[in-house]
Amino acid sequence: TPMAAGVGIVRPPVLAIHGAEDDLIPADALHTAREQLAQADIGVEWHVHEGLGHGIDPVGQHLAAHFMAQRVGGLRASR
């Protein structure tokens, strides 16, 4: 376990992206998750994508790449 290894508790930030037109999981679920993560002291960046249903599109891919590039040294997000 992390505690046994002397590492401590790690709480990496989370990126939440949700389609406003998602007919499987309501977009309000993103806000519930973001509030609960914040209460657990976990940083959250979030984005509700207008016109997107239940899926991933190039905008979401770009947001995810940028999010990761900001947090992992040496990587660059492509456009």
Image (cartoon, helix red, strand yellow):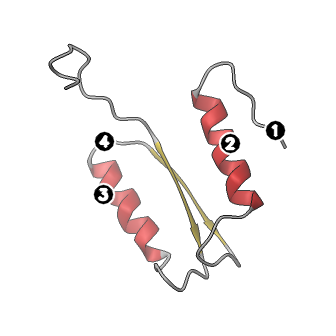
Residues at discs 1 and 2 in contact (Cβ within 8 Å): yes
Label 1 – label 2 distance at C-alpha: 8 Å
Q: Please, what is the three-letter code of the amino acid marked with disc 3?
A: Gln
| Foreground: disc 4 or disc 1 | 1
Crowding near the residue tagged with mark 3, few <14, some 14–19, many ≥20 C-alpha atoms within 10 Å:
few
Q: Which mark is residue 41?
A: 4
Label 2 – label 4 distance at C-alpha: 23 Å
Crowding near the residue tagged with mark 2, few <14, some 14–19, many ≥20 C-alpha atoms within 10 Å:
some
Label 1 or label 3, whichever comes before in sequence order:
3
Q: Quadrant of residue 51?
A: bottom right
| Foreground: disc 1 or disc 3 | 1
Q: Please, what is the three-letter code of the amino acid marked with disc 4?
A: Asp
Residue occupying the point 41% across, 35% down: 12
Q: Quadrant of residue 18?
A: bottom right
Q: Please, what is the three-letter code of the amino acid marked with disc 1?
A: Ser
Residues at discs 4 and 1 in contact (Cβ within 8 Å): no
Question: Which residue is under mark 2?
Answer: 65
Residue occupying the point 44% across, 75% down: 28
Label 1 or label 2, whichever comes before in sequence order:
2
Label 1 – label 3 distance at C-alpha: 31 Å
Question: Which residue is under mark 1?
Answer: 78
Q: Quadrant of residue 72?
A: top right
Q: Please, what is the three-letter code of the amino acid marked with disc 2?
A: Ala
Label 4 – label 1 distance at C-alpha: 30 Å
Which residue sits furthest right? 79
Crowding near the residue tagged with mark 1, few <14, some 14–19, many ≥20 C-alpha atoms within 10 Å:
few
Q: Considering only vertical position in the picture, is 49 above or below 43?
A: below
Which residue sits furthest bottom? 23
